[in-house]
Image (cartoon, rainbow, N blue to C red):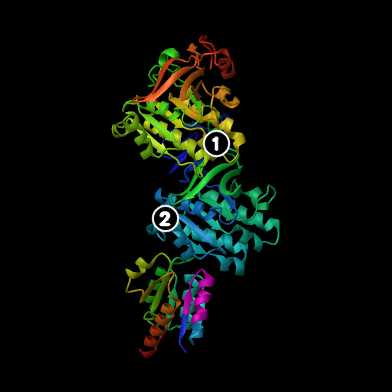
């Protein structure tokens, strides 16, 4: 079973997405800030990361940089989806950090499909 | 923008008007550093702006505009080089918020995430409590170097508290941190705030937003119910929400309790533009006076006004402030009378402002009028007519005070004003008493009347009052035709009976009287 970490300070958004992904057979864990998200990533080594941009403690951008800079290289290749209300442009200007960028609001189907696609790719590599 | 404030800018930026806070309060505000809210009118009501490092509660029922007000202030801070943190607890999602804000001119998406940061700390509050929330807020403020904090959801934080002491401690801890760092705080809440609410006792100021139904219309009003250590204009002030955000209109009589400057008393007469009238009123109107033209529809009030406006020049421009004719219809009326308003407008001699008599706000009208007079250095003003103010008044009982403030300020600005008042009637000459409040408020009172006589409709003019002037009290015929309104011969009605019933004064000259 593929694992996904969803990081969003608006915990109800994270919970709603987690519910949809769980229904697709994925294992999902959520965090409400970048620091807690990094801990989860380190512990779980998920197949996909979905993160918001503006969050307490560290932004989604800082989180993605931290993941990509993982010294052990264990996590540096995990696909990251940026799911943001106002920073989609910043995300798109960092294709090295974010594999896919979604701007809120967007169709839940699209983001679920993207997570499933990236999880499958990750499992096949 | 941050400044020490003793004097106030105009309620609406750009007018150049300076008003002064009530003297009694001035000493209290001397040392305070102000932060401009960027909400037109609000800084005037706050006697210079928000106090830097102070904490305010913004209270109002859902839909009153708290979120708009707070975001408008936050975006303004970023335009002035500040940084703001907007923290939600249990509110609408941020993407919904941005969708709603994108309808407003002040919303700048490029500032979001760069100078203005939106985060939710609901999980911290729910799982760790108020003390942890204070710590998280301190960390985030430091991380982003913020000068403004908005906490949207004080009621939610209060729900987490187990006692009034918890609420006070939460507010006090946050307040002491932000005061020390010079960060201004806005707590948003929909909970009714009374004087003994723990949060009310702790904060420096309370801004209440109120939306209510008056008859069948919605009226929004703002009140500063607490302003610790700083003056504020008391009472309710109307505000409007439009695509520009919130505009607050300080209650005119509260702002201009006394005029902004000394009245001009020049020794000259102001031509009316009405041929034949000057000789009845001592050579013209007294300077910087307010003249009320009273009469029924069709008696020539607007035509009189067009004559008055026709003497405007680019150096001494005029303002038409009307509620009835649209600019196009007004110009057509002018063309029919041979008064070329378009040419005056093109030359910069005439400004036309039209506010259809729909759902206007009284103070918005007053400020629009005075701001235009100040900005364009208007010398002649024609208001058509006073009913437009009356219909906009939510509380008609304040009209006398409003008119007093408005007319005093117009005199102080040296404007010669003519205003119309439509009176019922009157197919005759009886009932010439003006409304009591206007008798003393206006410098000059002029009646325009019409009556069917000998099978034709005849129009008349009569001067009831003319400040500091000798004037002819006899009624005179007036004719409307090419060139507008003209005063003709003295009215002569055969037979004493009609004369008596009509209440026409005998041809005579009234001795000069004071205003």
Q: Which residue lies at the image location 53% right of the left edge and 75% below the top edge?
A: A15
* Residue most extreme to the front: B455
Q: Position of residue A66 (x, y in %)?
A: 40, 73
Left or right: B89 in relation to B37: right
- What residue is pinned by disc 1? B390
Q: With respect to residue B27, does B182 lie above or below? A: below
The answer to whether one can see residue A69 in this image is no
Crowd around label 1: few <14 · some 14–19 · many ≥20 (10 Å) = some
Q: Position of residue A4 (x, y in %)?
A: 46, 81
Determine whether the residue tagged by mark 1 lies in a helix, strand or loop. Answer: helix
What is the spatial separation of the Cα atoms under label 2 and label 1, in whole angstroms? 35 Å
Q: Position of residue B422 (x, y in %)?
A: 51, 31
Q: Position of residue B364 (x, y in %)?
A: 49, 40
Crowd around label 2: few <14 · some 14–19 · many ≥20 (10 Å) = many
- What residue is pinned by disc 2? B107
Q: Which residue lies at the image location 60% right of the left edge and 34% below the top edge?
A: B398
- Which of marks 1 and 2 precedes in the sequence? 2
Q: With respect to residue B151, does B388 lie above or below? A: above
The answer to whether one can see residue B242 in this image is yes
């Amino acid at each position: 079973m593929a694992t996904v970490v969803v990081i969003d300070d608006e915990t109800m958004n994270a919970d709603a997405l987690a519910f949809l992904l769980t229904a697709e057979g994925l294992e999902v864990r959520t965090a409400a800030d970048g620091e807690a998200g990094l801990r989860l990533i380190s512990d779980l080594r998920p197949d996909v990361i979905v993160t918001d941009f503006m969050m307490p403690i560290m932004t989604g951008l800082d989180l993605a940089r931290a993941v990509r800079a993982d010294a052990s290289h264990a996590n540096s290749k995990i696909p990251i989806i940026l799911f943001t209300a106002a920073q989609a442009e910043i995300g798109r200007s960092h294709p090295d950090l974010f594999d896919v960028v979604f701007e809120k609001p967007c169709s839940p189907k699209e983001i679920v499909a993207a997570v499933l696609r990236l999880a499958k790719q990750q499992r096949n590599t | 923008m941050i400044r020490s404030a003793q004097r106030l800018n105009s309620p609406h930026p750009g007018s150049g008007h300076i008003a002064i806070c009530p003297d009694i309060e001035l000493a209290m505000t001397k040392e305070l550093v102000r932060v401009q809210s960027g909400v037109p009118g609000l800084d005037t009501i706050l006697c210079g702006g928000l106090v830097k490092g102070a904490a305010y509660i913004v209270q109002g029922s859902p839909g009153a505009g708290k979120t708009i007000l707070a975001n408008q202030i936050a975006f303004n801070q970023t335009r002035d080089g500040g940084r703001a943190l907007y923290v939600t607890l249990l509110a609408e999602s941020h993407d919904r918020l941005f969708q709603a804000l994108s309808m407003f001119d002040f919303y700048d998406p490029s500032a979001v995430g760069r100078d203005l940061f939106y985060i939710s700390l609901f999980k911290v509050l729910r799982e760790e409590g108020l003390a942890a929330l204070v710590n998280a807020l301190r960390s985030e403020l430091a991380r982003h170097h913020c000068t403004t904090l908005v906490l949207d959801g004080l009621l939610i934080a209060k729900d987490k508290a187990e006692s009034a002491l918890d609420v006070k401690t939460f507010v006090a801890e946050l307040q002491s941190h932000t005061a020390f760092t010079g960060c201004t705080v806005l707590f948003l809440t929909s909970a009714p705030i009374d004087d003994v609410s723990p949060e009310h006792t702790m904060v420096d100021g309370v801004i209440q937003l109120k939306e209510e139904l008056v008859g069948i219309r919605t009226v929004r009003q703002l009140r500063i119910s607490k302003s610790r250590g700083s003056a504020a204009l008391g009472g309710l002030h109307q505000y409007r929400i439009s695509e520009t955000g919130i505009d607050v209109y300080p209650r005119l009589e509260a702002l201009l309790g006394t005029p902004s400057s000394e009245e001009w008393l020049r020794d000259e007469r102001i031509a009316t533009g009405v041929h034949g009238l000057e000789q009845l009123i001592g050579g013209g109107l007294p300077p910087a006076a307010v003249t009320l033209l009273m009469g029924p529809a069709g008696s020539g009030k607007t035509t009189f006004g067009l004559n008055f406006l026709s003497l405007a020049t680019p150096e001494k421009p005029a303002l038409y402030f009307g509620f009835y004719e649209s600019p196009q219809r007004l110009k057509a009326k002018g063309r029919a009378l041979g008064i070329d308003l378009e040419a005056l407008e093109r030359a910069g001699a005439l400004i036309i402002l039209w506010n259809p008599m729909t759902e206007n706000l009284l103070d918005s009208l007053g400020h629009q009028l005075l701001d235009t007079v100040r900005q364009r250095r208007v010398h002649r003003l024609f208001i058509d007519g006073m009913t437009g103010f009356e219909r906009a008044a939510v509380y008609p009982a304040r009209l006398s005070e409003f008119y007093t403030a408005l007319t005093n300020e117009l005199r102080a600005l040296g404007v010669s004003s003519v205003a119309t008042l439509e009176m019922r009637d009157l197919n005759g000459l009886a009932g010439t008493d003006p409304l009591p409040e206007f008798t003393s408020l206006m410098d000059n009172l002029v009646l325009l009347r019409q009556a069917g006589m000998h099978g034709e409709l005849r129009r008349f003019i009569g001067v009831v009052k003319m400040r500091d002037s000798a004037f002819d009290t006899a009624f005179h015929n007036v004719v409307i035709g090419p060139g507008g309104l003209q005063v003709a011969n003295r009215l002569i009605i055969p037979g004493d009976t009609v004369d008596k019933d009509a209440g026409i004064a005998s041809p005579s000259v009234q001795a000069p009287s004071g205003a």
